[in-house]
């Protein structure tokens, strides 16, 4: 399926994508599998960057997993979610031969994790360390498990009594999951030593791109659709040749492809109705087993409130680090064909926005860059009126670029201008800054080409 893929990664730090047994990596604490539990409207993809950082510091990618659950509790109830977590821990312990797992929870996931640990001493005994990420305070260690509590912006009085409590007051709610600072704290807590790197270095050779296609926000697996992986031209977003892999989505929506760390790819989900959902992101750099393609049935959920036509493009741009549009020089920039869609209306810091929908509201061919009413009351999600001209065959290019707050480099993703009548476009940017940038904006930690 992936034989002959061009553009193999050119820098070191190799990692096997197969289970290697029990690796021997020096540290005061044994290397154990890791499980991440997300918060409301989240998924395991919020742990993608940290998973790669752990792998860059000696963890096999097969040791790093996340629990996807229905945070609306309409499809799943707590008891079912806890049973699923039991099964995931069982599988990890059997696969790795480890004595226990290390557990992390974020936001609502801290409530779920704390409740799980306190529900049964046998459950708590299988967890060596617990990290409480910007969520529920506690008057004692959950289940008696050794705990690290990391807090972002907000009240400095929040605490887990008996835990090591660390404050990052300049970081957003979800940023506490994905930042290099929280990674360093968690790694040191798990291993008893500091990490070798907090960067995401390139991995040698072929990598694995794996995960699940799921219905948002229930995280139920998508079934009965076709998933294709295409390599694309980074200058235009257009596909290069035929699909390098095709899989039928069944069951929990799982998929796996072989690729390389420096190429740009498009995941395309095609439904029996002919509707296509396109997913674009920056090069993966390393094996990523926590990819989540968040979708929904056409005409349902948020798709039902977005206007569509043959004439305009509809894009959703996301990042697992809040977009800030009202912080002056400390704001993020997110431009679509040169127009910055972040401002005090669309992305106030208090909204904690992780994803913005941009489309031609009213189908009038005009733009009005304010928060659309349908999105005003939603947490983590925003929407704005932006007209982007479509091409019937998606032969044109939409240029989407971010400049992260406190960062110097502009990162660009070019995608085809598919018409919104039959096509949805999701674009995901990195939540991290490369640690060193050359004048060209290329990561100097990697040998050219980068």
Image: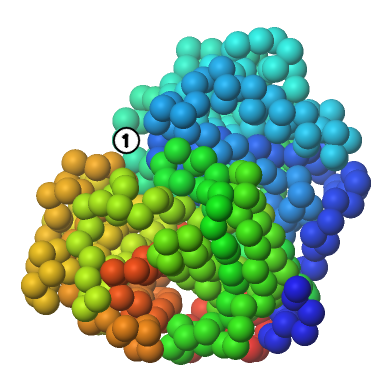
Q: Is residue 120 left or right of 377 when viewed as pictured?
A: right
Q: Residue 265: give x, y in percent of width and height.
A: 56, 75
Q: Residue 197: give x, y in percent of width and height.
A: 67, 60
Q: Nearer the viewer, residue 281 or 275?
A: 275
Instruction: State the quadrant of the C terminus.
Output: bottom right
Please give the name of the residue rendered at 63% of the width and 89% of the height, measured from the top-left corner.
449
Residue named by callout 1: 154
Q: Is residue 132 left or right of 84 when viewed as pictured?
A: left
Q: Is residue 171 left or right of 199 when viewed as pictured?
A: left
Number of disc labels: 1
Q: Residue 171: give x, y in percent of width and height.
A: 39, 48
Q: Residue 373: give x, y in percent of width and height.
A: 12, 49
Residue 399: name its quadrant: bottom left
Q: Which element is circle 1 on?
A: loop
Please give the name of the residue rendered at 79% of the width and 52% of the height, measured from the top-left corner.
60
Residue 98: name its quadrant: top right
Instruction: State the quadrant of the N terminus.
Output: bottom right
Please give the name of the residue rendered at 31% of the width and 48% of the height, measured from the top-left corner.
300
Q: Is residue 290 visible?
A: no
Please give the name of the residue rendered at 55% of the width and 53% of the height, measured from the top-left corner.
224
């Amino acid at each position: 399926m992936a034989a002959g893929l061009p553009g193999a990664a050119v820098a070191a730090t190799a990692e096997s994508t197969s289970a290697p047994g029990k690796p021997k990596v020096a540290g005061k604490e044994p290397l154990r599998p890791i499980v991440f539990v997300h918060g409301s409207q989240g998924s395991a993809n919020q742990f993608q960057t940290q998973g790669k950082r752990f792998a860059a510091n000696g963890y096999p990618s097969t040791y790093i997993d996340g629990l996807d659950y229905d945070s609306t509790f309409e499809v799943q109830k707590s008891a079912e979610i806890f049973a699923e977590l039991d099964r995931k821990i069982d599988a990890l312990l059997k696969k790795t031969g480890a004595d226990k797992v290390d557990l992390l929870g974020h936001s609502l996931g801290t409530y779920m994790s704390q409740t799980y640990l306190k529900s049964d001493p046998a459950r708590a005994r299988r967890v060596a360390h617990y990290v409480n990420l910007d969520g529920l305070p506690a008057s004692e260690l959950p289940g008696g498990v050794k705990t690290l509590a990391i807090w972002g912006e907000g009240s400095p009085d929040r605490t887990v009594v008996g835990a090591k409590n660390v404050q990052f007051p300049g970081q957003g709610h979800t940023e506490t999951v994905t930042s290099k600072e929280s990674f360093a704290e968690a790694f040191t807590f798990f291993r008893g030593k500091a990490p070798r790197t907090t960067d995401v270095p390139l991995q040698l050779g072929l990598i694995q791109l794996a995960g699940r296609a799921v219905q948002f926000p229930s995280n139920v697996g998508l079934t009965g659709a076709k998933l294709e992986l295409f390599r694309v031209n980074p200058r235009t977003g257009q596909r290069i040749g035929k699909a390098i892999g095709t899989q039928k989505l069944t069951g929990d929506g799982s998929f796996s492809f072989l690729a390389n760390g420096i190429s740009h790819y498009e995941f395309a989900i095609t439904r029996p109705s002919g509707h296509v959902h396109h997913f674009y992101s920056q090069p993966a750099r390393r094996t990523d087993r926590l990819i989540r393609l968040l979708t929904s049935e056409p005409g349902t959920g948020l798709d039902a409130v977005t206007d569509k036509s043959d004439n305009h493009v509809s894009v959703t741009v996301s990042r697992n680090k809040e977009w800030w549009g009202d912080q002056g020089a400390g704001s993020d920039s997110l431009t679509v064909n040169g127009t910055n869609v972040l401002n005090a209306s669309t992305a106030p810091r208090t909204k904690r926005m992780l994803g913005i929908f941009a489309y031609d509201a009213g189908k009038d061919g005009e733009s009005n860059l304010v928060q659309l009413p349908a999105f005003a009351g939603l947490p983590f999600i925003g929407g704005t009126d932006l007209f982007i001209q479509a091409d019937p065959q998606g032969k044109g290019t939409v240029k989407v670029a971010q400049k992260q707050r406190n960062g110097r480099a502009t990162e660009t993703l070019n995608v085809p201008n598919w018409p919104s009548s039959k096509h949805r476009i999701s674009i995901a940017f990195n939540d991290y800054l490369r640690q060193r940038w050359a004048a060209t904006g290329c990561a100097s930690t990697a040998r050219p080409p980068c």
